[in-house]
């Protein structure tokens, strides 16, 4: 799904603030949060702000949070990015003809973030952004690693004309049993992050969809196929693997998790799930819509308990969808593999 940015209307306000913060760290460190403030989305928010009061408020709040940043990691980094993702979701829904409104926050009660007036009735959206697995430890660790890299470069330049160094940003780093190729680990982290600060009150006003941004916690493989219980991987060996997002929502204790074998003879069964999925554990949630974007290209993956309860407007943005019975897997679970 594509959005189009109108260059003539772009005010470049949010991204200018990001650049100013980045420039203060040049040659010293790099802040891993900054890369998630996508330039194209910043421009789109700035372009819509003069004619949409909701977007204007988001723009002001985001800029205010950015200006309060310290050079090292602080909580306002996270809150600014969360508001950025909320604004991004509002913009893409609005641009696709969905009648979305922001629900004002109240100190006395938990409410969803948005309401939508659809042709088949009103529904609500609770938006949640997933940060790095270990939050501050991951963010601060990435900044410290970038400082070490810059020190290394400065040291090399004492005797060389050209220097290079690298540092690693590991969103899942530090979690128990860390393995960058583990589907089971990714499932566990996503489930735990989703359930943090999730309250039944946020889903009590009426039919409510939980939207989850996964830009910072990328999943292994094709997100479109990940809504299937199992699917055929796109590598040459055409292995059967478990769908990460399906198991995050509908997994049961004891389910075997199939993964890619990195070499011949390596087991492709990682083990069994040790906890149930979000839609199994949380009966007040009826559907989860995972989403991510690269620039103005968005993808939305929906897992739901009952297709008949899914608002028709959601299909305007849907990339793929499935249910607990895996009844939609035929659309996504096979690929053409070249011999």
Image (tube, helix red, strand yellow):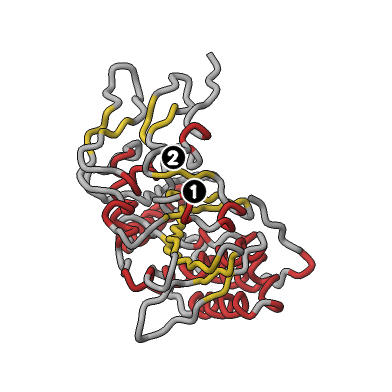
Q: Give the alpha-carbon distance from disc 1 to disc 2, as whole Å.
A: 8 Å
Point 46% across, 53% down: residue: 290
- Drawn side of residue 191 relative to residue 274, left or right: right
Foreground residue, 38 or 301? Answer: 301
Q: Is residue 225 above or below residue 121?
A: above
- Number of other residues with Cα within 10 Å of mark 1, as a class: few under 14, some 14 to 19, many 20 or more: many
Q: Earlier in the sequence, mark 1 or mark 2?
A: 2
Give the mark count: 2
- Drawn side of residue 276 relative to residue 299, left or right: left
Tag 1 secondary structure = strand
Point 53% across, 51% down: residue: 300
- Drawn side of residue 87 relative to residue 283, left or right: right
Q: In this view, which residue lies farthest toward the top?
A: 339
Tag 2 secondary structure = helix
Foreground residue, 248 or 15? Answer: 248
Visible residue check, residue 188? yes
Mark 1 and mark 2 residues within 8 Å of each other at the beta carbon = yes
Residue 96: image x %, image y %? 66, 59
Which mark, residue 301? 1
Residue 144: image x %, image y %? 36, 58
Point 71% across, 57% down: residue: 4
Visible residue check, residue 81? no
Q: Is residue 215 above or below residue 75?
A: above
- Number of other residues with Cα within 10 Å of mark 2, as a class: few under 14, some 14 to 19, many 20 or more: many
Residue 180: image x %, image y %? 34, 40
Residue 77: image x %, image y %? 43, 70
- Drawn side of residue 175 relative to residue 143, left or right: left
Q: Quadrant of residue 283?
A: bottom left
Foreground residue, 4 or 174? Answer: 4
- Report the residue marked by disc 2: 226
């Amino acid at each position: 799904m594509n959005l189009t940015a109108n260059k003539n209307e772009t005010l470049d306000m949010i991204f200018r603030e990001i650049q100013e913060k980045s420039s203060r760290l040049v040659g010293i460190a790099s802040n891993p949060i900054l890369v998630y403030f996508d330039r194209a989305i910043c421009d789109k928010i700035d372009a819509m702000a003069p004619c949409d009061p909701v977007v204007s408020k988001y723009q002001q709040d985001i800029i205010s949070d950015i200006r309060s940043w310290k050079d090292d990691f602080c909580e306002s980094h996270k809150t600014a990015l969360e508001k950025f993702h909320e604004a991004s979701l509002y913009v893409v829904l609005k641009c696709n003809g969905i009648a979305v409104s922001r629900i004002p926050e109240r100190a006395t009660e938990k409410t969803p973030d948005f309401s939508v007036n659809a042709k088949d009735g009103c529904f609500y959206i609770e938006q949640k952004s997933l940060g790095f697995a270990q939050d501050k430890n991951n963010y601060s660790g990435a900044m410290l690693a970038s400082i070490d890299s810059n020190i290394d470069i400065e040291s090399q330049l004492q005797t060389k004309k050209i220097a290079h160094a690298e540092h690693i940003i590991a969103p899942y780093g530090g979690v128990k049993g860390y393995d960058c190729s583990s589907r089971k680990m990714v499932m566990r982290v996503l489930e735990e992050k989703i359930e943090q600060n999730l309250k039944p009150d946020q889903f009590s006003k009426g039919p409510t969809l939980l939207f989850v941004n996964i830009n910072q916690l990328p999943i292994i493989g094709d997100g479109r196929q990940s809504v299937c219980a199992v699917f055929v991987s796109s590598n040459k060996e055409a292995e059967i693997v478990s769908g990460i997002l399906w198991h995050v929502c509908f997994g049961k204790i004891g389910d075997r998790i199939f993964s890619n074998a990195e070499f011949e003879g390596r087991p492709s069964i990682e083990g069994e799930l040790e906890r149930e999925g979000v839609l199994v554990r949380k009966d007040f949630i009826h559907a989860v819509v995972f989403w991510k974007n690269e620039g103005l290209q968005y993808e939305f993956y929906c897992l739901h308990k009952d297709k008949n309860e899914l608002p028709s407007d959601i299909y305007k943005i849907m990339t793929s969808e499935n249910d607990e019975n895996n009844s939609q897997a035929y659309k996504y679970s096979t690929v053409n593999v070249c011999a």
